[in-house]
Amino acid sequence: MTKRIWRAFAFLAAGILASSVTVQAVTINNGSMGIVATDSIQNWPQAPAVTSETAVLMDASTGAILYDKGMDDYRYPASTTKLMTILVSMENSSPKDQVTFTETGIRDVKWDSSNIAAQLGEVMSMRDCWEAAYIKSANEVCTQIAETTGGSEADFVNMMNQRAQELGCTNTHFTNANGLPDPEHYSTAHDMAKIMQQGLKSKRFRNLIGKTDYTIKATNLSAARQMHTHMPMMAKESSLYYESCIGGKTGFTNDAKHTLVVAAERDGRTYIAVTMRTDDLGINCKDSISLFDYAFDNFESLNVNGTLLTVPKGITVNDLQAETQNVNGTDMNSYSYNGQFVGYVPVAVATPEPTEAPAETAATETDAQTDETAGEVVSDQEAAGQEAEETEQETEKTGNFFSDLSQTSKILLGVMGGMIVLLLILLFALRRKENR
């Protein structure tokens, strides 16, 4: 009972906050090629030719942009929308939650719409739904995820838009959870990269997008369903298979054409490539592979006061420009190279030197720190070898939805907090009255 009350207030908060998100009157310039802005940066590595109308290459750790071809130009995201659907659902539900398909969900079971032929009244786990949404791009599953997680499809879409706003996606607006055509459902290559970047921070999300095969066990109305990826860069049987690829989502509609959001990781560096609007998915894949190779071959990690920044090879700290900024209440040095942002580094805080530092004590502390670090490495390796969904704590999914809110949003949440307290007092009084 209490859990349902808290969840209801969470959805109410999303609705109130999302009401401040206005729909822009935007122009979708389908058919026009974006301008490669990064080509104008002095001494920036020459990028490969990219066929996609718009594209971006982002450093997943810092958010720095290595390649920009009209990255803020509006386009239709199609099924890459499902990355946001999965992210928001993971942050607000459990993989063990039971999902029952209603008329809302099965309306999208059509011959010309990606689906798994879910049936009215069919029950499966939320984990199965995430897998179907990702691997099979099942539209009816995404709609049912929305209704189950958000209480209604509309409330969940409000949650998606609010989350996008929190992530700094200033040129994005969603009207549904699956990406089916709608003139007011739009995004940009840059915003889609930001959504992927946030997803990669979650072990559960990373584990999901890293899969190429999954079997949904038999349900109350269906035999088991075996699923295999249709993303060429993830499929070993494909000529476009890319070994460093750690996951990605395709999308297609007649207006959006082919779009792709994909990530690659090598030697501790992770990059995100988004390519939008091509005539063939193979073009998206080739463009993405070219961009990833460009990143791995022409950039390297530079340690700046303990923070790794991705910069063109051969660049030193002395070649960077720094400007102190306040980022979410923390003083940070914003580093750039010839005007191009490469990352934030916390401002170093001077600490007083100890009056005495006995050699024996210092050595003991150093040994302890070394042992602790080694233990962390071992723990990370062990965790990586296990199934992430089974080892993650349920608490991981909390805390994300209300992060990085504006001051106005925090005030609204404070008001709602007071309402919650009043409601709990009323419930307590009613419970006492019933017990009498």
Image: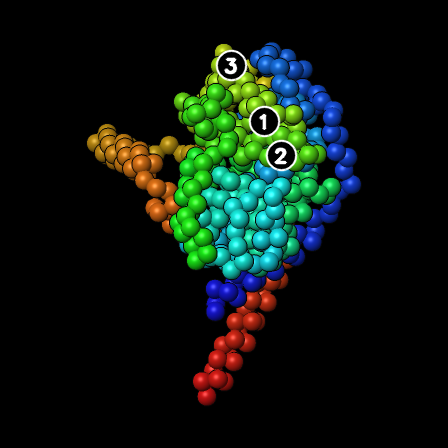
Q: Which residue is mark 2?
A: 252
Give the residue type that dot 1 points to. Leu
Q: Nearer the viewer, residue 182 or 216?
A: 216
Query: Residue 298's mark?
Result: 3
Residue shown at 53% from the left, 48% from the top: 117
Residue shown at 48% from the left, 53% from the top: 93
Counting from the top left corner in percent of width and height, residue 286 is at: 55, 20
Q: CA distance from mark 3 to mark 1?
A: 26 Å
Whether residues under marks 2 and 1 lie with C-beta atoms below 8 angstroms apart, the answer is yes
Closer to the chain start, of discs 3 and 2, is 2
Q: Quadrant of residue 211?
A: top left
Q: Nearer the viewer, residue 65 or 273?
A: 273
In this view, the residue farthest toward the bottom is: 436
Counting from the top left corner in percent of width and height, residue 311 is at: 52, 19
Give the residue type that dot 2 points to. Phe
Q: Which residue is mark 1?
A: 281
Position of residue 135 relative to residue 406, above or below, is above
Tell me if I can see residue 348 in this picture.
no
Counting from the top left corner in percent of width and height, residue 67 is at: 60, 21
Q: Nearer the viewer, residue 336 or 114?
A: 114
Q: Is disc 3 surrounded by few (<14), some (14 to 19) or many (20+) residues within 10 Å?
A: some
Q: Is residue 235 left or right of residue 110?
A: left
Q: Is residue 74 left or right of residue 106?
A: right
In what element is the residue under mark 3?
A: helix
Residue shown at 62% from the left, 34% from the top: 252
Q: Is disc 2 surrounded by few (<14), some (14 to 19) or many (20+) residues within 10 Å?
A: many
Give the residue type that dot 3 points to. Asn
Query: Residue 124's mark?
Result: none
